[in-house]
Image (cartoon, grey):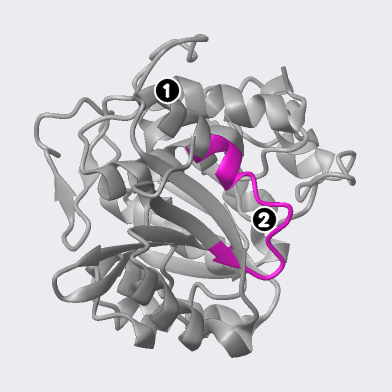
Amino acid sequence: MIKGTTKILGVIGHPIAHSLSPAMHNAAISHLGVDFVYLAFPVKPEDLEVAISGFGAIGIRGFSITIPHKQAILPLLSEVSPIARSIGAVNTVYLTDKGWCGTNTDVEGFLAPLRRVSTGAPPLQSGENSLKVPLLSPLGGVRDLGGSPGADWSQKVAVILGNGGAARAVVAGCAQLGCAQIHVIGRNEQNLAEFQQSWLNSAMPVKNLQVHTWDNLSSLISQADLLVNTTPVGMYPHGEKSPVDAAAIDRISPGAIAYDLIYNPSPTQFLTDAQRMGARTIDGLEMLVQQGAAALKIWLDRESVPVDVMRTALQKNLGLK
């Protein structure tokens, strides 16, 4: 029940009616029994600055950022974490004595299921709670990395399909894992060169990043220990499509990890084809859950939140289970 004491969290974007965040976060809030509510706020680009000012005035505690505001909000914040600056985007904002502070939990969301699969852990079961992975501190790097289980990535090769905003979080995650080589595949050579240079000049430089056009895809797939799709190809309602044709995906090594950031349909054609060749697969649902859980931990100042409840809420809303 919403009361006069209820604290407000939310998500801003334009459009925002399709957002799954309210269902996911409110399920966790209800389970925890805390006096919070999570709402969706449609904010047009031209209204962003006044909206952020208004949020402070009415005491909103924190909010998620989605398209088209992830970059535009940066100059409106009092403080931005190094990881968010490196990615060039904020997806989580929280209130401190200094004002609005921004970070990016997409990297933690990306890494959580990957760490589990790479260590040979069994698939998540219904009712299972938070994954035991490193937490990204809001304004710092990684906490508790040394004590966390994980495979040795120092000799591994990551191949990332796409060089948009989602690819930036994946590059940051692969760099954090310590991958020996990180290859990014895109269509425009100038955009790829700018993408590479941006990482050399970032707050968290990535020097082992190489960029390629799509005609190099087949040869790179055969080298990949991790193959990640960050493009929208194969997303609902075009679930029959894949960013990788049959001849190319046949070159993936058995035991490699194929990871698709798309969560609807589940599995995508890309993952179906990769699994047929003996690859281990991860879809985008768990990344969505884990980035949301990481944000909720910040807002509620809790070490853990009911990830299983959040996952079930998403699956129900997507009609996946």
Q: Is residue 155 left or right of residue 244?
A: left
Q: How many marks?
A: 2
Location of mark 2 (residue): 217
Q: The C terminus appears in which quarter of the rendering?
A: top right
Is 79 a magenta residue? no
For the point 50% across and 79% down, the residue is 51
Q: Which of marks 1 and 2 is nearer the N terminus?
A: 1
Q: How crowded is mark 2: few (under 14 residues within 10 Å), some or many (20 or more)?
A: many
Q: In this view, does 238 lie to the left or right of 6?
A: right
Vertical side of 203 occupied by 183: above or below: above
Instruction: Mark yes or no: residue 167 visible.
Output: yes
For the point 61% across and 90% down, the residue is 46
Instruction: Mark yes or no: residue 66 visible.
Output: no
- Per the image, label 2 sits on a secondary structure element best described as helix
Q: Give the range drawn in magenta.
A: 12-25
Location of mark 1 (residue): 31
Q: Position of residue 100 (x, y in %)?
A: 28, 73
Tag 2: amino acid: Leu
Front residue of 226/310: it is 310
| Labels 1, 2: front one | 1
Q: In this view, does 62 lie to the left or right of 213?
A: left
Vertical side of 300 occupied by 315: above or below: above
